[in-house]
Amino acid sequence: MLHVYKRSSEPMRPWDVMRHGGRNNIAPEVKQKYLVLWNADVIRKDNMWHYVFEFDTRDSLEISELAQIFAGSSATPTRYPDGTDWRTWLGQEWVVIDNRRRQEILKGGGNGKTGEVTITTLRVGSSQFPLRNQ
């Protein structure tokens, strides 16, 4: 996994590109060819939005057979959508961080003061499993 930290005065919309892929044009030290946005942690603090994006680093945008089975539909795509330009999408002033720094950012997030918001583990998906017997 690759973690990217970004601060912004305006909110971003990470769910628009969640589970989308694109060429790895932000982390040349990572040898994998593609990145898929897998998760976003969001903190609103001191009138700024703090984002920690988690990218799956991949050599292919093919969705594994196991993931296709869990999706539960024969119409499930076999590839993640391609074409996101991560450098353009992230804009200015972002940095690749390690897991230790990610934890520091998340732990130092909202401390319960009025006007602070912490949203962690924003994992977009759909439930293909029935919630109760039908």
Image (cartoon, rainbow, N blue to C red):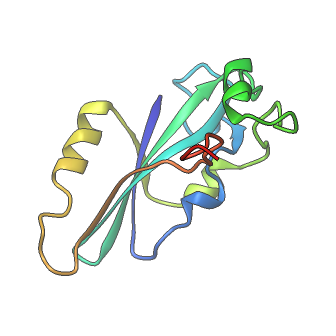
Q: Residue at x 65, y 60 (%)?
A: 16
> How many tags in the picture?
0
Residue toward you, 43 or 88: 43
The percent coordinates of residue 85 (x first, y second) are 70, 49
Vertical position of residue 85 compared to residue 35: above or below: below
The percent coordinates of residue 119 (x first, y second) are 34, 59
Vertical position of residue 50 compared to residue 73: above or below: below
Vertical position of residue 14 compared to residue 20: above or below: below
Q: Residue at x 63, y 35 (%)?
A: 35
- The reply, left or right, for residue 103 in relation to residue 66 is left
Q: Residue at x 54, y 46 (%)?
A: 132
- The reply, left or right, for residue 5 in relation to residue 63 is left
Residue 26 in which image quadrant: top right
Q: Residue at x 74, y 19 (%)?
A: 65
The percent coordinates of residue 67 (x first, y second) are 67, 26
Residue toward you, 30 or 57: 57
- The reply, left or right, for residue 133 in relation to residue 46 is right
The percent coordinates of residue 109 (x first, y second) are 20, 58
Residue furthest toward the right? 75
